[in-house]
Structures are given as C-alpha cells and as structure tokens.
Image (spheres, rainbow, N blue to C red):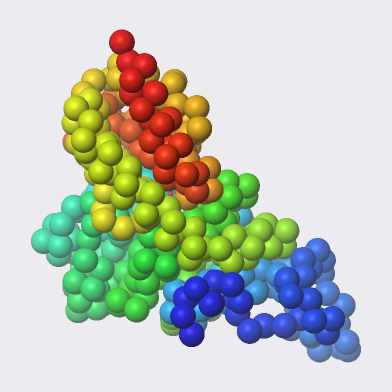
Amino acid sequence: MDIQTICVHGCDKHYDTTGAVAVPIFASATFAHPGVGQSTGFDYSRSLNPTREYLEHTIAKLEGGNHALAFSSGMAATTVLMELFEPGNHIVASDDLYGGTYRLFSNISQKNGIKFSYADSLEGIKSAITPSTKAVFLETPTNPMMRTTDIAEVAKITQERGVLLIVDNTFLTPYFQRPLTMGADIVLHSGTKYLGGHNDTLAGLLVVKSDALNERLHFIAKTIGACLSPFDSFLIIRGIKTLAIRMEREQETAKALVQWLEGKNKVAKVYYCGMGGMISFSVKDEQTAIKILEKVKVIKYAESLGGVESLITYPMLQTHADMPESERNARGIDSRLLRLSVGLESVKDLIADLEQAFGSLA
Ligand SMILES: *Cc1c(COP(=O)(O)O)cnc(C)c1O
C-alpha cells in the first residue's frame, strides 16, 4: 500500500461496531475486567489506551516498524529512550542537534552518568565509538544547519560494532525518509511538528522493529508515565491523514522560496537539504535578522515547525539558547541565522511577506 493511503486510513485496528470512520477518543483511564485473571487487552491507560494504540500502530506502519509508543512530547520520548542506558554508557550524537535534545543530554543524562561525544561525519562517528558506546544518535538533516548524514552508511558501522542506531526523523517524516528500512533500530519523532501538522498539540513517538527493544521501552514508558492522552492521540491521527499532501506542498513552496532567497543580496547563505519544508538562511548582519523577524506579518515569529502556519525562528535566542555561545558559533548558529518552517500559505503571499520584510530594511 502506498504511504499516501496509509496516512489517510491509518492502521487496520477497529475498536467499535458502529462503523465510525474516525477513530473514537477512548477517554477512559481504566478498563473493567470480564472476570478474574481476564482482560479485554486494556487495563489502565498509562499502559495502553485504544486511541493511543491506534496512533502507535499507524506510525509503526508508516515507518516500516513493528511497534511504536506515543508520549506527551518529543522530549518525553527522548527522556524515556535515555532510560535504556546506564551510568558509564557512552553515546555518539550528531553535533548539530535540536537544542532541547542537547539540553537533555548535557544537563540530565550526563548527570545520570551517561557520556556523550559529538561527531559531524561518518569518519567522526566511527572514531568516536569506544567499547562503552551503546548507541549512535542521529538527526538528519540537522537542526538548524540542514546537514545530512547517510543513514545506511552509519547503520553499517553500528551493526558491525553492535550498538543501537537511533534516528530523530522529525524533519523529513516517513513521507521522505524511513530510517528503519535503512538499518536504524529506533526512530524518534516530535509528533508536535509535521505529524500533528497544525501547531495545536505536543506529542512524541518512538518506533522500533525489535520485539525485545519494544518490551524494554514499553516497560520504561508505563513506569515513567509520560504517555500521550487519548485526545492528543486523536489530533495526531487526524494530522497524519493529510501528512502526504502537506509534505508535498510545503516542499514545493520551500523550493520556490530557496530560489527566491538565493537571489537576494541581503542573504549570505541558504541552507536546504533538497527535501521537505525546512530552510535556514544567514543574512548579512544581526540588524537585518532582527528587522526581518519584526517585520514579517503572514509568517509568524515563533518557535516550532512543521505546521500549516509558516513560522520563522531565531535559533540563537530560541531553540538553541541553552547551548554555550562557543558551541553555537562553532556550528554556525549565530546572530545572522534564521530558520523558516514553510507552511501551506500561497507561495505568492509568502514571497510578498518576505519581500516587504526585506524591503523595509533601512
Ligand atoms: C521539536 C523537536 C524535538 C522535541 O520535541 P517536543 O515535541 O517539542 O518535545 C526533538 N527533535 C526535533 C528535531 C525537534 O524539532
């Protein structure tokens, strides 16, 4: 079945007999047992809830995985993931990570005894792996610099060394990239972004192929309790129905905007990975960056990405504010860098908005 169809129809689970076309929101914390020692399959919603399960099956199917878990945010999913590791374990991560992930690693996971190395190339990853390395954590393309890594090549290394390969697939979604089919072990999503797609709810997802890994993660998930509510699960299911068409259209608009930005002499450099709806660009000075942020009207100056509304972000002050300045500068995340999440507005209106924001510069 094509991915467009899976997006619309989700998984094949049915929980009711009414023929409801949309999955019901099972707003129940607990489930009655038919007899002693018996269960309908559902006992308590922290462990399993039908609406959330439907979402979990759907994302597993989209990513080519066998199991998935849904959490109250992307960071909740990553926090659960980190509980797979023990003090002394070492993780090699992309050196241009989502700021919140970097904050988790450097403030919480590190305090809990997990060690990190950051690498920016295949060679870098290879040489950073030590006998205590348990996982490689990749973001591709990276945020906000849009650098890409060949997942299949990294998978060769991780499989040879017997370490887990974790890929944050938030930016491209299974519509453009399916890491599990390229040898990754775990896919992570901030469902807040493209999967939900409407800037109206937070969610996080983990997807795996392995039964054993799923069992360990499910145990941690139900123990920690950062699960996604039935209402929010419903919103993500609804968002996914239009994922394919949104990704296509946002990519088309992004490509037109990349071309437009490249023709602007106030733009020093455009970063685009060739796919999807995320663009970063560097302008000639800080003053120009600030004026653009203050003058855009259709495009909102706000954190986050992947929704129907176009958003412009100042990574230095927003997503990457907690990264030390020297680390930020080394990655090119400076006062001239802006990040644009392209939404579903008409390309004409977006260009006109940017044109007036650029044109209004003194
Ligand atoms: C937003 C984001 C996260 C964190 O997800 P939340 O839903 O905001 O907790 C993780 N990774 C990437 C790439 C993100 O963009």
- Which corner quadrant of the image does residue 280 belong to? top left
Residue drawn at 88 percent across, 89 percent down: 35
Residue drawn at 58 percent across, 50 percent down: 198
- Which corner quadrant of the image does residue 325 belong to? top left
Above or below: residue 33 compared with residue 157: below
Is 219 or 322 nearer to us in this picture? Answer: 322
**Residue 127 appears in view:** no
The total number of labels drawn is: 0
> Residue 281 location, x and y as percent?
27, 36
> Residue 193 location, x and y as percent?
50, 52
Residue drawn at 60 percent across, 76 percent down: 10
* Residue that lies at the very extreme toward the front in this rendered image: 348
Residue drawn at 29 percent across, 31 percent down: 337
**Residue 275 appears in view:** yes
* Residue that lies at the very extreme toward the top in this rendered image: 362
Is 245 or 229 nearer to us in this picture? Answer: 245
Is 353 or 98 nearer to us in this picture? Answer: 353
Left or right: residue 146 versus residue 207 is left
> Residue 358 location, x and y as percent?
33, 23
> Residue 147 location, x and y as percent?
23, 51
Above or below: residue 233 compared with residue 218: above
Q: Quadrant of the C terminus?
A: top left
Above or below: residue 77 compared with residue 361: below
Is 171 or 154 nearer to us in this picture? Answer: 171
Above or below: residue 208 compared with residue 169: below
Left or right: residue 235 versus residue 1 is right
